[in-house]
Amino acid sequence: MTMPEDRLSELPDDLLRRVLFFAPAREGAATAVLSRRWRTLWRTSGAVNLDSRSYGGGFTFDKADRFLRDGEAALAAAAAAGGPVRRLTFHVEEEDATGVYVFLRIREDGTEQDMVADVVRSPAARRVEELHIRAADRLGHNSRVFFELDVGDLPSKTLRMLHVGDSARLTPPPPGTSFRLLADLRLTGCAVSLIGLQRIVDAAPQLTALHLESSCFHGEEEILDETQCYRLLFPAVTALVFADCDWPSLHHGLELEAPELRYFRYKGTLRNRHHGLSLKPQVSSSSSSSSSNLSRVDLHVLIDYRYEEEKVCVRLWQFVQNFSATKVLKLKLEFPIDHIAIAEKKDQEEILGNRLFHNLERLELQGWYEPKSNAAATAIGNLLYCCPVARDLRLSLIEASAKKLRESSLLDLVRSKDKLDFDKSVNQFRLHRRKMASSLDGDGYDNYEVPQIPGLSEHSFSCLRSYLRRVSLEFHMGEPNCFGVQLAKFFAKNAIVLQEMHIDDGNHKMWEHMNHKIERWVTNSSRRRNLPATTNFRVLPYETLKRIE
């Protein structure tokens, strides 16, 4: 019997160390028994990854004790091997919040401890470049602080990346501390004061990536008494995430100033303008207009349904206009897009005015709509008006009733039925189209099948005349004359330089049936305008967008 070939041993030491760089410390140490060659590999990988999941089972004091002992031993072994520990991961996860808290804070004899501080203060951790600390309960019902982290205890001379997750209270470093290499800071589920957050950022002059998620930023008395907005300054940050965070109701809101910002992502409830979040406009040194390095903004907006619909509309537009300098805007609404429609010309002038997105090349809108109202079309028209040079438009819309169906237990059953009946419906659709084509000619056919869209079709937009080259429509097709098909017709007939359209109505074959019809709309539209026929226009499945990107 021949022994299987040992391909793992053929790999060079540096590659094996790279693999062990990401392995949990307990598993990494276990590789020392494989052979003499492996005895030193895990100790010289440059990383110590402490993970309570390696010890299995639920919480016991013995498990916590072994975790800490093994962690100290792994750090000591790595230090004795001669190379610095460049990456330190501390991950504790238990079934519930009590288990996590006791694991980190209480010894078996009832005395208190600070396990996180004991590890990060270890002499072997003084040259760490990447530090990841996370404590989590699997039930996710925690409302208590699991551990305290004094940022001043961390290795200020070498630290490049700091990720702290779930239920940590942070103390900012003392004045004069400098984390001169820190470029990536992620705080998830943390608590720190607004002043403390500013002190942490001030101590990291090279900080370019700042990720703040599900964190609470409380305000000291002097902030709450201020008569102006409170400003957080992030001088070097180029990528900023501010998602599901909480901060106090300040008199004039919270303003973020990030002059080098290129990417911004926000998720949260729409607040009152005077208590909400805003981004200080970036002014280019080479232009007096509002321009910047800002290339992409992702906004995921929720609302408090106690607010009146009219107030939601005004607040949403005021918030979105903070990002008028961006090149790409993705707007996801957790409420009907009808709520942001501005129908009256007087209101349009007052709310929208001349505050246009002059740099915006791509607009993405995701939300749901009420089919019995024209407000959704009006809202899309408002967005088109504000984006005069948009080249790429992506709409992902779902009818309110279809949204409820997706959220119900009947979804899987309906999908199965649609899949079985779809081929049959395709044949019926094509047969019906041929019969109608024989009895109606030219424009009469498409006007008969797909009516215009009130609130949109009667308007003209700058981007449609000169810029819009790609339209992507993702929608739920409830019936042949649904809103999604009306939109397809509108853009095919009015976007003069349109080159391609991507369509998905939920069954992933809609583009096959719409291809001929849309090409005909485009051709007829060009003929009416006395323009050359578009020869390179294509209708493509929605999935091809992923290949483009």
Image (cartoon, grey):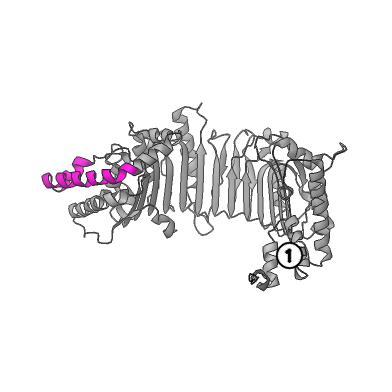
Let me know if residue 101 appears in the view. yes
Residue 110: image quadrant is top right
Q: Amino acid at mark 1?
A: Ser
**How many neighbours does mark 1 have within 10 angstroms: few (below 14), some (14-19), or many (20 or more)?**
many
Which x, y percent locates residue 456? Answer: 30, 40
Q: Which residue is mark 1?
A: 45
Please tell me whether mark 1 sits on a helix, a strand or a loop.
loop
Which x, y percent locates residue 418? Answer: 34, 41
Which x, y percent locates residue 332? Answer: 47, 42
Let me know if residue 341 appears in the view. no
Magenta stretch holds residue 443: yes
Which x, y percent locates residue 501? Answer: 33, 53
Q: Nearer the viewer, residue 181 or 370?
A: 370
Magenta stretch holds residue 494: no
User: Magenta span: helix, strand or loop, mainly?
Assistant: helix
Q: Which residues are magenta?
A: 420-449
- 415 vs 10: above or below: above
Residue 191 as seen in the image, left or right of residue 258: right
Residue 137 as seen in the image, left or right of residue 69: left
